[in-house]
Amino acid sequence: MKRLEKNVTLITGGGKGIGFGLASAFAREGSDIVITGRTESRLIEAKKKLEDQYGVEVLAVVADGADEAQIKGVIAQTITKFGKINTLINNAQASSSGLPLIEHTKKDFDLAINSGLYATFFYMREAYPYLKETRGSVINFASGAGFFGKPGQSSYAAAKEGIRGLSRVAATEWGPDGIRVNMIALLAMTESLREWKENYPELFERTIQGIPLGRFADPMEDIGRVAVFLASEDASYITGETISLQGGSGLRP
């Protein structure tokens, strides 16, 4: 039997990049999948790939994470189709990476906070009753941009550190309900990182040189497999933690 057979996993931003890698890793372990995003064609393509390759059921829902009503709709559709939620993964995040702090506008900050922190809060709050029923888990994402104060990442870092604080509080409050809440801090080649590379090429090269393993994380094999572990019974006594997947670059005392 596969590790997550008969489970239902909801992944925001699951139609591309890290989100699709996560969806692939969970589908490979037998979980049915719900993916959300703002581009219908991309979600439909991802749904077909996942169903064809892994034989699981996939629900694709167009939704904007900053829209509270749309998130309520995602949860309602998930319960209508599958009847439960075992794991919630808040992956989606947008930001104006590359802008120095003094050049940020409120609009730039709103983009990061609304798509990241507010979306994570909304999804967690709406999914809570169903996670309680399954004694499920939440996986959120932190970032080295917040840990280390990376230039050009002020709004992104603020959103990610906000998510980390929210996650730790939820881990404490929801522990008695059997719900585990953990975070992954990763270093993977994302669209935001590509923008950062273009704006700060020298710093980007120093970042690469500072990764002991000499590469960025693979969304499915590196990030996805750790997320599967956190969602599984093997991690049943882990909550409130931030797991660093940064190839050794995040070494701290």
Image (cartoon, grey):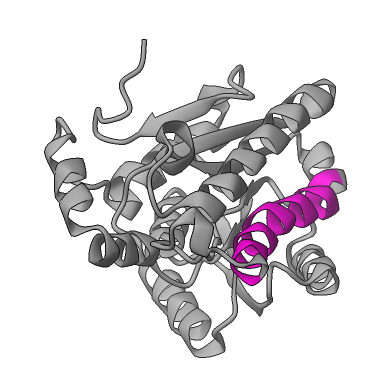
Q: Is residue 17 left or right of residue 180?
A: left
Q: Is residue 48 above or below residue 68?
A: below
Residue pictured at 38% horizontal, 62% vertical: 98
Q: Looking at this view, is 143 or 120 the one in front?
A: 143
Residue pictured at 36% horizontal, 67% vertical: 191
Instruction: State yes or no: residue 112 in magenta.
Output: yes
Q: How many marks?
A: 0
Residue pictured at 40% horizontal, 30% vertical: 244
Q: Position of residue 32 (x, y in %)?
A: 58, 59
Q: Is residue 169 above or below residue 199?
A: above
The quadrant of the picture occupied by the C terminus is: top left
Residue found at the very far front of the displayed protein: 102
Q: Position of residue 30 (x, y in %)?
A: 49, 52
Q: Is residue 30 visible?
A: no
Residue found at the very far top of the displayed protein: 253
Instruction: Considering the whole magenta stretch, tell me its main secondary structure.
Output: helix
Q: Is residue 59 visible?
A: yes
State which region is magenta.
107-128
Q: Is residue 150 above or below residue 10?
A: above
In terms of image quadrants, where is residue 59? bottom right
Instruction: State yes or no: residue 17 in magenta.
Output: no
Residue found at the very far bottom of the displayed protein: 41
Q: Looking at this view, is 192 or 26 the one in front?
A: 192
